[in-house]
Amino acid sequence: MNYEKDSIASHCESHLPIFEKKSVKEIEKSIIKRYRKRIWTKFTKAINDYNLVEDGDRIAIAISGGKDSLLLAKLFQELKRHGRNNFELEFITMDPGYHKHIRMLLEENCKHLEIPLKIFDSNVFTVVDKIARDYPCYMCARMRRGFLYAKAKELNCNKLALGHHFNDVIETTLLNVFYSGNFKTMLPKLKADNFKDIELIRPMYYIEEQSIITFIKNSGLMALNCACMVAAKRIGNKRYEIKDLITSMKKNYKYVDKSIFAAAQNVNMDSILGWVKDGKNVSYLDKYGE
C-alpha cells in the first residue's frame, strides 16, 4: 500500500532506515536467536527479578505503534509460546486522534506481526490541544494512561504492560533530579492509584534503546513515534536534552548510564538530607543524635 509521504514521515521513527520487511517467522526467530542476549534474556530477567508475570495473570499489552510497544507485544507472544506461566494476553491500542494514514500503518504492522489488536478511540489529542497547548506531553501521557487502565479493566485484565525501557528509566531519573529537584525513578511495577485491581508493569526495564532500534531496523518495519498531532512541530523536549547529555557523558565514561541506573538501587539513607515516606517529608535531623 502506498501512503502519502508527508502525512506519515514526520510521525515515524526518522532515525530508522527502512530495510526489506522480514516475515513474521523470521522476526520471531530473531528475538530468540539473534537478539537473545541483548533483548530476550534481559526481558525474561526483568520478569523474574521483579515477579512481573504470574500464573493466572490477564495482561493488557499497550501498543502505540512505536518501536518499543511493537517489540513488547512480540516478546509477550514468545513468552507465552516458550514460557512456563499460565497467563492470558490482550493487545490494546488507544487511538488518540491519529491521522488516518498513521492508523493504517499501525494496523498493517500489527497484522504483519500477527498481533491480534483491539483498537478503541478517544479524543486525547483534541482535549490536550485545548487545555495544555504549550506543554502537551505530560497531560497527554496522563490521559493516555487513564484510558488504557480503563480499557484493561473492561477486559478483566489485572496488569497493564508498557514498553518503557532502560533508557527511559535513567532519563526519568535525571529529569526528576534536574527539573523537579527530587530523586525518583521509573519503577518496574506499581499499583495503579485509581484502578486498585490493576498493576502496571514494565518488562523491558533492562533492555537498552539501541538494541530496540537495531531490532526494528533489521525487521524492516516502519514504526511510529508518538504520532502526536498537537506537539508535532514543537521542539525543546526536555527528555531529548537529557538523551544528548547522557550521550555526551558516555564519551568520557562509557558506563555512566549503568551508574545512573544503579544509583536508584543503592540509595544510602544515612547520607541524604531528607526523603519522603508515606507522603510525609522526613529530615535526616529527625534521626540525628538518636
Image: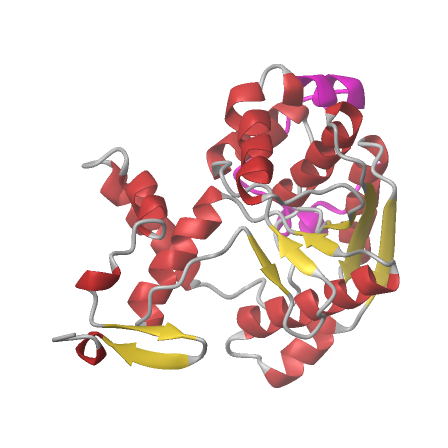
Horizontal and vertical percent position of residue 77: 77, 32
Residue 31 seen from this side: yes
The total number of labels drawn is: 0
Left or right: 185 as drawn, with respect to 24: left
Q: Quadrant of residue 229 in the image?
A: bottom right
Q: Quadrant of residue 72 in the image?
A: top right
The boundaries of the magenta stretch are: 1-30
- Against 61, residue 82 (above or below) is above
For the view shown, which residue lies furthest in the left direction? Answer: 289
For the view shown, which residue lies furthest in the top direction? Answer: 33
Q: How is the image coloured?
A: secondary structure
Q: Residue at x 55, y 44 (%)?
A: 50
Horizontal and vertical percent position of residue 213: 54, 34
Q: Residue at x 46, y 63 (%)?
A: 235
- Between 122 and 91, the residue placed more toward the observer is 91
Please state, as top left, top right, bottom left or bottom right, where the N terminus lies in the image: top right
- Between 44 and 222, the residue placed more toward the observer is 44
Horizontal and vertical percent position of residue 258: 33, 39
Residue 96 seen from this side: no
Please state, as top left, top right, bottom left or bottom right, where the C terminus lies in the image: bottom left
The chief SS type of the magenta part is loop
- Between 45 and 166, the residue placed more toward the observer is 45
- Against 101, residue 175 (above or below) is below
Is 4 contained in the magenta span? yes
- Against 52, residue 33 (above or below) is above
Horizontal and vertical percent position of residue 63: 73, 49
For the view shown, which residue lies furthest in the front direction? Answer: 290
Q: Residue at x 59, y 48 (%)?
A: 202
- Between 29 and 20, the residue placed more toward the observer is 29
Is 77 contained in the magenta span? no
